[in-house]
Image (cartoon, coloured by chain):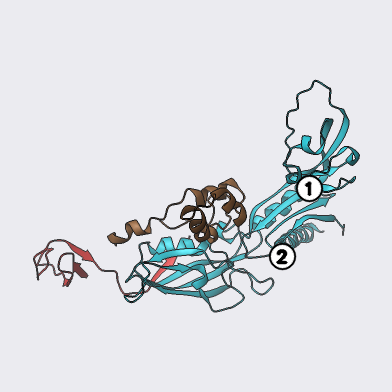
Amino acid sequence: MMVPVRCFTCGNVVGEHWEEFKTRAKEGDEDPETVLDELGVERHCCRRMLVSHKDLVDIVAPYQ
Amino acid sequence: MQDYEVEFVERGDREARFLVRDITPAFANGIRRAMIADVPTFSVDELRVVENSSVMFDEQIGLRLGLVPLTTPVDEFEVGDTVTLSLDVQGPGREESTETVTAYSGDIVTSDPMVEPADENIPIIDLKPGQRLELEADAVLDRGREHAKHQGGVAVGYRHLQRVEVVGEKGEFEDDEPHILRGVIEEQEAAHASAGSGGEPRNGELVPTEAFDHDLTNRYPGKDLEVVDVPNAFVFHVETDGSLSVDELVTRAVDSLRGRAEELRDAVQL
Amino acid sequence: MSYKCSRCKRDVELDEYGGVRCPYCGHRVLLKERSRDIKDVDVE
């Protein structure tokens, strides 16, 4: 579905950084590690939120 | 009233680290808990959904809106006060070339400019052609102990300040294993430290362990070390979600603690 | 109750005698439309 607004573990707001992370690391060819460092997503609990996320809205859209 | 010595190691709007001396562990923990559970912040608590033809249920949208941090001005509101927000976003029309329109936290319109989303780029929901989200929301001021969405502090914690003492030279044939340490150290035998990237070593200086990659052997090569906790000195790490600044969060937490201590004193007075 | 036929997409009013069936095309799959009321949601 959509990116989580906050980190499940610590409650830090991670949704804010998703679009930039997506364009730079997922669609672009930058190293996810350096992108996350530059975005200030420091802890590994917040990092996994972005690294492991997949947008599914496009996939479920035809069924509503 | 007793004064306490507070020294900042790192200070930003949303993240800070500071050292407090001469406080008991109980008091340090009291401040930490007050920061998490006692400082009220605004958060969306009720929705009136006019139209929602998106792929998510009303309740899911509500949950996401509740987690968006809202700026909370100090001393302007009381716990239980509400501010009305609204959101109205439509999917792309036929003449638009894009496939989706995303509703962001920045699209939320507020009735009171003092209470607005602290971050503007949080995606709420993607809308396809023909889909629309229109709603009104009430943000309520409440405390973290009522619901985690009202917590202003994120990853709030503290560690003992640690003192590093050089007790001698390392033996010639000893292993050079790394000596990992996290937190902030107070340099005692600075004469034996090597500067590295952590700045010129001086006695009594506070050095965050990131300065030498958390490895004491980088800072004190070839030395035999002893690390001790400095009694009653605590290094706090405070982050906020943006609803308050670190300064506001900490001072309001301490105020609430003092308020309760005074209440207790008055209650037990003969 | 307002429903919509899933085949011909026309609005259908159901009564207790007609059974579940679209009166226009005879299709038996009907979709319930969302009410136009404003819905109150408690965020938990």
Give how far across and how far down residue A32 sits, in percent. Answer: 54, 50
- The hue of chain A in the figure is brown
Which residue is at 69% across, 55% downward? B238
Visible in this render: residue A5? no
Q: Which residue is mark 2?
A: B248
Along the viewing direction, whichever of B16 and B208 lies nearer the viewer: B208
The chain painted cyan is B
Residue that mark 1 sits on: B234
- Rendered image quadrant of residue A17: bottom right
Q: Amino acid at mark 2?
A: Glu
Q: Which of B267 and A3 lies nearest the eye of the viewer?
A: A3
For the point 35% across and 59% down, the residue is A58
State the residue at coordinates (85%, 55%).
B4
Q: Where the C terminus of chain A falls, by quadrant?
A: bottom left
Task: Indicate the position of residue B59 as horizontal and vertical percent values.
Answer: 41, 62
In the picture shown, does residue B222 fall above or below B65? above
What is the x, y in percent for residue B48?
A: 42, 72
Q: Quadrant of the N terminus of chain A?
A: bottom left
Tag 1: amino acid? Phe
Instruction: Identify the residue at image location x=62%, y=75%.
Output: B114
Give the left or right position of residue B167, taking residue C38 as reference.
Answer: right
Local secondary structure at mark 1: strand
Q: Which chain has been coloured red in this picture?
A: C
Question: Is residue C11 toward the left or the right of residue B229 in the image?
Answer: left
In the picture, residue B16 is in which quadrant? Answer: bottom right
Separation of disc 1 and disc 2 at Cα?
Answer: 20 Å
Q: Is residue B193 left or right of residue C5?
A: right
